[in-house]
Image: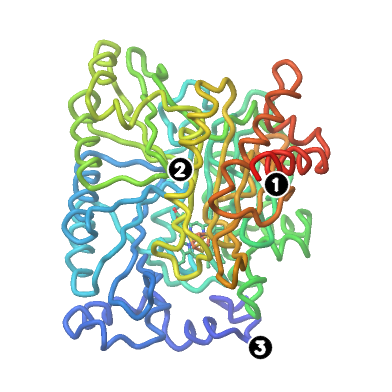
Amino acid sequence: MSKRGRANLATTLNKEEQLKIDKDGLDVLADIHRYAQEGFAAIDPGDFIRFKWYGIYQQKPKTDPYFMMRVKIPGGMLNYEQAVTVAQLANDFGRGLADVTTRQAIQYHWLQIEHMPEIFDRLAKVGMSPIQACGDVVRNVISSPVAGLDAQELFDVRDLVLQVEQLFLSNKEFSNLPRKFKISIAADPRDLGHPEINDLALVPALLGDEAGYHVLVGGGLSAKPFLAKNLGIFLRQEEALDVIKAVVTIFRDHGYREKRSHARVKFLMADWGPEKFLEHVEAVTGKTYTRGGVRQTTEWNGAYLYGVHPQKQAGLNFVGLSLPVGRISGDILLELARLAKKYGNGDLRTTNTQNIIIPNVADENVEALLAEPLLQTFTAKPNTFIGHAVSCTGNEFCNLALVETKERMKSIANYLDETFPNFDTPIRLHVNGCPNSCGQQQIADIGLAGALVRIDGKMQDAFDISIGGGLGADAKFNRKVVLKVKGDEVQFAIEAIVRYYEQNREAGESFRSFANRVEDDAVKAAVAAAQQARA
Ligand code: HEM
Ligand code: SF4
């Protein structure tokens, strides 16, 4: 088999494929150092795309000399020195902003090319890097944010998460994939690692009393979302690294390179199916894997872990805190690090719900931690709606965005919390600023997808509203029910949907079950009636 995807290069290539052949994404490092000396104006247009291999994206507008940068945090595991460095870099170079992302990473804004070498150096000193946080490579490996701490997990996956990160990091064998590749590894039965929306996910399984994995391949969101499919094997823990490498190899060599919108491994899986995919895996590794095993999965809770939870280590607890829509400042992160050191062991965990966890808090320290001033704002017991609100970057910084998202989501969630105080059931709200789905709107109870409408000759923010998504055993994407609601009216439309749920649910029925039971027309009618009443 030819290396690095050359197998299918005979077909028409898209622009990015040609750029990668001309110069590998990883080879742009020397140029970044040169541009840091020469300045923004010297940057070759093709290198803007290659910058992604070092986690660097152009910020909006592209003509301005500012960049976003994503820094990887494998499994969301940050130690004290790392958290302090991440926070100080935000303050020194990123106007104080640090966004926790939907894949446990941190995203900076406002960086300038001149500062990149120092940012790389300071991250490297604490064992961190932005390398391959973006680009056509294996991205940040995500996990359960409480891996190694949680009494419910079958076993500890942290070593494997770090081994996978090391295997692919700056590895030229895998630096030219057809598209990005997202991996989730967790042995948690609540599916805290959002397995079905990753390109490759390992989830916990049992064969008799042996604990290992099931392997899911081909999930992903964007405009055409797919749920990952189970290859049907019981993977022993010691076999995991080889199989992960094989799946990425297959994607590299057989993935589609003609159209960027048809390049993720989900399209290969859709054509091949899991049986053929498994044949290829076994051909690459030269092994035959045991069939069967039983996936271990309990109710999916959306990966929300607020409050105080006893760890499997006796006498210790992890404390889940809310960071509304993932936006914090360097100063807040510094304070979180200080509290983690004072009350825990200095570690922090970022979550894929854009929140944070302070682990390893001794029983006797819990009360004092909860009484800290910072925790009165970034609380362990957030209001229902703001505590379950996720947002992509949106048009504040993203060149692809149609609409603003983070402030919009905060105001919608705060409005709902005022309207339905102490609402008894979590309703997960996600918003995307365009169809790319960085805010994962398809897995939301109520998802918002940004669109534009022309009103009185002017384009204005609007949102399509979808309901009923979720992962876990009954994984399913939500479905669009109400189209193009004006931005400043969307909170009223959601209020009508929540009220309709409140008045018509069965005892104990979750929003997700309700949404999948009721007819679209009934939901549309509830929204229309509320709109008329306001007119
Ligand atoms: C400049 C533009 C973009 C920005 C600012 C942006 C931002 C983000 C961020 C912050 C995340 C969380 C990622 C992480 O932690 O690793 C993310 C994830 C994601 N992005 Fe983007 N992104 C951009 C472009 C795109 C494009 C072009 C696509 C698709 C064509 C896309 C699709 C996604 C998807 C599907 C996720 C994933 C959620 C998941 O799998 O869990 N993004 N993006
Ligand atoms: S969903 Fe669209 S608008 Fe939001 S960050 Fe991703 S690419 Fe940008």
Q: Residue at x 37, y 66 (%)?
A: 170
CB of mark 3 within 8 Å of CB of mark 1? no
375 to the left or right of 451: left
Q: Amino acid at mark 1?
A: Phe
- Hey, which quadrant is residue 223 in on the image? bottom right
Distance between mark 3 and mark 1 Cα atoms: 33 Å
- Residue 280 in percent (x, y) is at 70, 61
Q: Nearer the viewer, residue 32 or 61?
A: 61
- Residue neighbourhood size for the residue with mark 1, other residues' Cα within 10 Å, grouped as few (<14), some (14–19), many (≥20): many
158 to the left or right of 3: left
Assign the C terminus to one quadrant of the image.
top right
Q: Amino acid at mark 2?
A: Ser
Q: Which of marks 2 and 1 precedes in the sequence?
A: 2
Q: Nearer the viewer, residue 160 or 329?
A: 329
Q: How many marks?
A: 3
Q: Amino acid at mark 3?
A: Thr
* Residue 411: image tag: 2
Secondary structure under tag 2 reads helix
Q: Nearer the viewer, residue 75 or 368?
A: 368
Secondary structure under tag 3 reads loop
Q: Which residue is mark 1?
A: 477
Q: Is there any visible trace of residue 197 in the rendered image?
A: yes
* Residue 12: image tag: 3
- Residue 496 in percent (x, y) is at 66, 36
- Residue 165 in percent (x, y) is at 41, 53
